[in-house]
Amino acid sequence: MKPPKLRAKLALFYAAVFTLLLSAVSALFYNLLAYQLDADLHSELRERASALRGYLRFEGGHARLVYDVNDPEEAYFVGNATRFYQVYDVAAGAMIERSPQMEALGFQYTPEEVNELVRGPDFTRLDTDQVDIEFYNCLVHGTEGHPYLLQVGAPLTLRNTTLRQMLQVTLWLIPSGILLALMSGWWMAGRVLRPLEVLSATVREMSIAQLHRRLPLSGTGDELDQLAKTFNDMFGRLEKAVEQMKDFTANISHELRTPLTALRGEAEVTLARARTESDYRTVLESQLEEFAKLSKMIDQMLTLARAEAGQIKIARERVNLSSLAESLVDQMEPLASIREISLTADHAGEVSVIGDSGWLERVILNLLDNAIKFTPQGGHVTLRVSRFSGEAVLEVRDDGIGIDAEALSHIFERFYRGDPSRSKELDGAGLGLSLAEWIVQAHHGRISVDSLPRKGTMFRVSIPLAPASFSPANTPRQAQQRD
Ligand code: ADP
């Protein structure tokens, strides 16, 4: 976004709307004023004409105004009303009476015009070089019903001047209004865009090291506040993700450094003096074990990193958890019997889910491995597969050392290992359950744990059951990437 461009656009838009409105309102006022002035003039002329009719007398082809000249009010009215007045004999089409002002104008209608005026409109306008006059035309009848045309007029000077002045004011008002609208639009757009500029400047300045910074909120809850809040939420999420990444890196370094230091120390001590071949063999064999643990850990880390980067695809095929569980229990049986632990499987017939057998195998192996690892001699580990409300439920139960409440909330975190004293003896980088949780979630399932210290632990995995209609032929198996 380039603020000046947007600012100019907003200001122009505002000015255009304002100009349109101002022009429309001015035109409306002008027409209303003209209409009102004309209406006032017309009613005035009607009143004058109807009063004059009362004073008019027709005798011998002449018209005369009969009124009390000693009555100042009457004399004033008649004098005023007859400034522009004339009477025509309709039958002859001849003018029989007019005021001196009309005479001075030297204007007279032809008989045809007189007839037209009798039939035509009530009001006519006469524009002369000296003055513009509005006339009211009315038919009056003399003795024996003889028709006469009475014309009472009034000058339009005041009306025209008023309208001209109004027009002049409007012509000044509109450009000034446009200028004012442009200026105020520019100012207003600047004010509106200012917080956006601040926002974009702050966002521009932000770097990974400054993710703790937050945009200021005005507290009004308006759209800009909402935008700033959205950005702040995003910074919060980014900050958390970066923190997790930092932790992960720190943990990786730590996890790798400790065994490497131990291996190096061991090699140095061994090389410090001459050894027998069997001594070397013993050291190398122990180191080989350490290397195996290290490569398992690196393998798990890589898998987790790729999983979180979305690089691992989960195949969609029908997997029968019961037969998978059975075969994995067979596979783990030798390990369990070495530790004198009874390992049994129990299932409720075919329980199928849609997913990736390879990844599901990894979850079950991890849970069985942990159960055997954390169960003392003579203990029991059971794997149960059942169905419950549309889900396949897989439970791995042991009567081993259990997990205390504090550790329970952390066991799915990366690199978390329970009691360090016992972890020393037992291998594992604390990544197995994080990976298991990711795999279960990738199968739209949940993994949970129940445990009591010294009583035992139970891990439960629930994954939606495969629909009866599911056929792998309809859903081609996706490319599968595994380490
Ligand atoms: P690791 O590979 O080190 O076992 P996991 O992520 O699989 O890592 O497990 C994390 C921690 O959870 C273990 O160090 C252990 O303390 C605890 N844990 C997991 N399973 C069990 C279990 N069945 N009984 C007791 N503790 C367990």
Image (tube, rainbow, N blue to C red):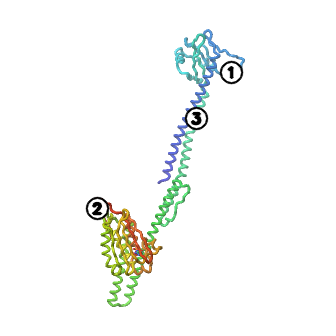
In the image, taking residue 425 as reference, residue 161 lies left or right, namely right
Q: Nearer the viewer, residue 429 or 65?
A: 429
How far, Cα to Cα, is label 1 from label 2? 111 Å
According to the picture, the residue beneath numbered tag 2 turns out to be 472
Could you say where residue 384 lies in the image, as x and y percent from the top left?
A: 35, 71
Disc sitting over residue 168 in the figure = 3
Query: Which residue is drawn at the image coordinates 52% and 57% (left, top)?
Result: 198
Of callouts 1 and 3, the N-terminal one: 1
How far, Cα to Cα, is label 1 from label 3? 35 Å
Could you say where residue 463 lies in the image, as x and y percent from the top left?
A: 36, 65
Of callouts 2 and 3, the N-terminal one: 3
Kindly indicate the quadrant of the structure image that contains residue 343: bottom left
According to the picture, the residue beneath numbered tag 1 turns out to be 76
Say what amino acid the circle numbered 2 marks: Pro
Above or below for 460 versus 41:
below
Could you say where residue 388 lies in the image, as x and y percent from the top left?
A: 37, 64
